[in-house]
Image (cartoon, helix red, strand yellow):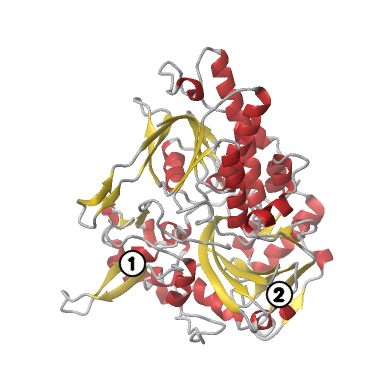
């Protein structure tokens, strides 16, 4: 199936690119065929974010007369709640201290922002894109990047075969994956996208850049009594439970937002460069909810949704080269999240729009050279040479996104080097005084997997048991994610052949099997090996539990897991994340 532009991923970046392309087509009287493929069962099903939304990029994308707030509510009854109160707390085990807003980094302030469900915003954008003529195919998982005969340029993607049993043999439902070819393929898979990572490696797009580092975000959505609701409240915390001393280097914090009509969006983000193999991000989140200054927000309420997703934390210094022959990286596939601002949706939308403008210009120039668009010819012109839309890189370098990320380029590394209090002080200095003009740039080297230290240096953490009302066991909460995979298919989480000895020989013996604790879906467990006479344990992978957070591909000792896509439509089915 040929297209002018193929977009892999139906998140904010991919959908914004599709919308901007259609706008440019209409404005210039041109026609391009544009397709979006999404591995979730529907647009929004795999989208998870905090989310306090900065509308700047969206308002630049949509026409001046568009009222996205009213349209979002009318389309799917999802409220965009204006922020009315901004609070930042430093928690101790029994109390808290509110940091005056005047002392907070300016990028943390949320005047003019909105509390939203990013998944519902994507559904709204997807509907708008379809109305404009974009073809959208949910349930199609891109499993492989396609290259030209010389292997030098991207020409599309192939979707995964469906209907293959665990034994590797075709079932009665077997259907061959589809080869989707395009003149330009834009990858907007989100953080740690499997196709995007393969492209970064093949084209060495991160040459001369810092290593990417990640955080794991875990989130619940609660419905609470209206009399306890504080519409527009935005609260962030540092300290308990992740940090207990000023120089603790476990990077992370929590968020709690009150969205209309009666929702509380709550979660934790833990930097995956933490050293303690006994740390359990999910149980730290459950423990945080019991804090005396946090518990009241949930009183009388019901947890209605749960999920998890990794996010990029490397920022400006870890941004790869954005383009390559035949395509580009968009949004969190590249890593545009602003870790100080705790936001990436606005930068993702902007990157999608800028990429669309560059791709449109590049394809328009080819048309001027006599190349017919696929929308007119129904096929890709075999004489067209691979196009690299380099103006996309230039456009992002000249955008407010670059300025925003450059200003805080050293802040995450300050936390990593010195700990939470010095890191916070440095961030305040940068945002209030230097504005990013400091003459140094600190780089980050090494993988998050390699930051885990040996278990012998730590003591197992004794977490309180769940009460089933405020705190929950993991598998109970997992049901709230709507996660489903067909059990009779090859596992999409695969141990790399060359690292087959790592689970039992390294992870279990040296690091006390941290994957049993950092996975927020209970995918990995070690059980008694019935074939062993010495009581040894073996790894069991419960791939059907996977919420597609990608944490295992990042934090596993030696990165021994190869995260591949399951059958399209599998995974979580988030409705209000």
Q: Residue at x 54, y 62 (%)?
A: 575
Q: CA distance from mark 1 to mark 2?
A: 37 Å
Q: Is residue 468 visible?
A: yes
Quadrant in the rendering for residue 158:
top left
Q: Secondary structure at mark 2?
A: strand
| Image coords of residue 112 (percent x, y) | 79, 56
Q: Earlier in the sequence, mark 1 or mark 2?
A: 2
Residue where numbered disc 1 is placed: 542
| Residue at the extreme right of the image, as rendered | 102
Left or right of 390 on screen, residue 539: left
Q: Nearer the viewer, residue 102 or 32?
A: 32
Left or right of 358 on screen, residue 145: left
| Residue at the extreme top of the image, as rendered | 370
Callout in the foreground (1, 2): 1
| Image coords of residue 17 (percent x, y) | 59, 38
Quadrant in the rendering for residue 556:
bottom left
Badge 1: residue crowd in 10 Å (few <14, some 14–19, many ≥20)? some
Quadrant where the C terminus is found in the figure: bottom right
Residue where numbered disc 2 is placed: 90
Q: Is residue 249 visible?
A: no
Quadrant where the N terminus is found in the figure: top left
Q: Secondary structure at mark 1?
A: loop
| Image coords of residue 155 (percent x, y) | 42, 30
């Amino acid at each position: 199936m040929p297209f002018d532009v193929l977009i892999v991923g139906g998140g904010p970046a991919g959908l914004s690119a599709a919308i901007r392309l259609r706008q440019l087509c209409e404005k210039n009287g041109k026609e391009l065929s544009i397709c979006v493929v999404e591995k979730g069962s529907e647009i929004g099903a795999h989208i998870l974010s905090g989310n306090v939304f900065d509308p700047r990029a969206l308002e630049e994308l949509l026409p001046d007369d568009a009222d996205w707030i009213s349209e979002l509510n009318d389309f799917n009854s999802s409220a965009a709640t204006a922020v009315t109160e901004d609070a930042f707390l430093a928690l101790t085990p029994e109390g808290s201290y509110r940091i005056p807003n005047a002392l907070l980094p300016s990028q943390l302030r949320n005047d003019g922002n909105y509390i939203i469900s990013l998944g519902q915003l994507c559904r709204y954008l997807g509907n708008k894109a379809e109305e404009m003529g974009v073809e959208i195919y949910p349930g199609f998982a891109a499993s492989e990047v396609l290259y030209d005969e010389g292997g030098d340029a991207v020409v599309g993607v192939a979707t995964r075969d469906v209907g293959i049993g665990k034994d590797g043999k075709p079932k009665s439902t077997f259907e061959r994956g589809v080869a989707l070819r395009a003149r330009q393929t834009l990858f907007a898979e989100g953080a740690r996208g499997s196709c995007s990572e393969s492209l970064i490696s093949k084209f060495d797009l991160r040459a001369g850049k810092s290593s990417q580092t990640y955080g794991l975000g875990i989130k619940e959505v609660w419905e609470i009594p209206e009399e306890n609701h504080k519409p527009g409240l935005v609260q962030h915390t540092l300290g308990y439970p992740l940090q207990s001393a000023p120089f603790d280097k476990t990077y992370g914090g929590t968020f709690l937002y009150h969205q209309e009509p009666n929702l509380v969006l709550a979660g934790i983000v833990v930097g995956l460069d933490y050293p303690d193999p006994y740390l359990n991000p999910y149980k730290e989140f459950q423990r945080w909810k019991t804090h005396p200054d946090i518990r009241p927000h949930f009183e009388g309420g019901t947890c209605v949704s749960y999920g998890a997703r990794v996010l990029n934390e490397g920022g400006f210094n870890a941004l790869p080269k954005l383009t390559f022959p035949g395509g580009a990286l968009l949004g969190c596939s590249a890593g545009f999240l602003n870790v100080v601002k705790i936001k990436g949706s606005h930068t993702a939308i902007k990157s999608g729009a800028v990429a669309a403008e560059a791709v449109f210009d590049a394809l328009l120039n080819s048309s001027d050279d006599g190349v017919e668009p696929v929308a007119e010819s129904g096929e890709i012109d075999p004489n067209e040479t691979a196009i690299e839309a380099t103006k996309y890189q230039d456009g992002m370098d000249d955008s407010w996104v670059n300025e925003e990320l450059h200003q805080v380029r050293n802040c995450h590394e300050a936390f990593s080097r010195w700990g939470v209090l010095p890191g916070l002080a440095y961030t305040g200095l940068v945002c209030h005084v230097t504005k990013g003009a400091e003459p140094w740039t600190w780089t980050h080297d090494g993988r998050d997997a390699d930051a885990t230290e040996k278990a012998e240096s730590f003591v197992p953490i004794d977490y309180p048991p769940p009460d089933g009302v405020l705190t929950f066991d993991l598998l109970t909460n997992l049901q709230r994610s709507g996660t489903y995979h067909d059990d009779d298919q090859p596992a999409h989480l695969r141990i790399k052949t060359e690292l087959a000895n790592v689970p039992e020989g390294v992870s279990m013996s040296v690091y006390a099997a941290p994957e049993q604790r950092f996975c927020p879906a209970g995918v990995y467990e070690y059980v008694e090996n019935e074939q062993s006479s010495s009581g040894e344990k073996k790894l069991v992978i419960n791939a059907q539990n996977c919420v597609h957070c990608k944490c295992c591909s990042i934090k596993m000792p030696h990165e021994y897991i190869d995260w591949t896509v399951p059958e399209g439509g599998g995974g979580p089915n988030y409705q209000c994340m």
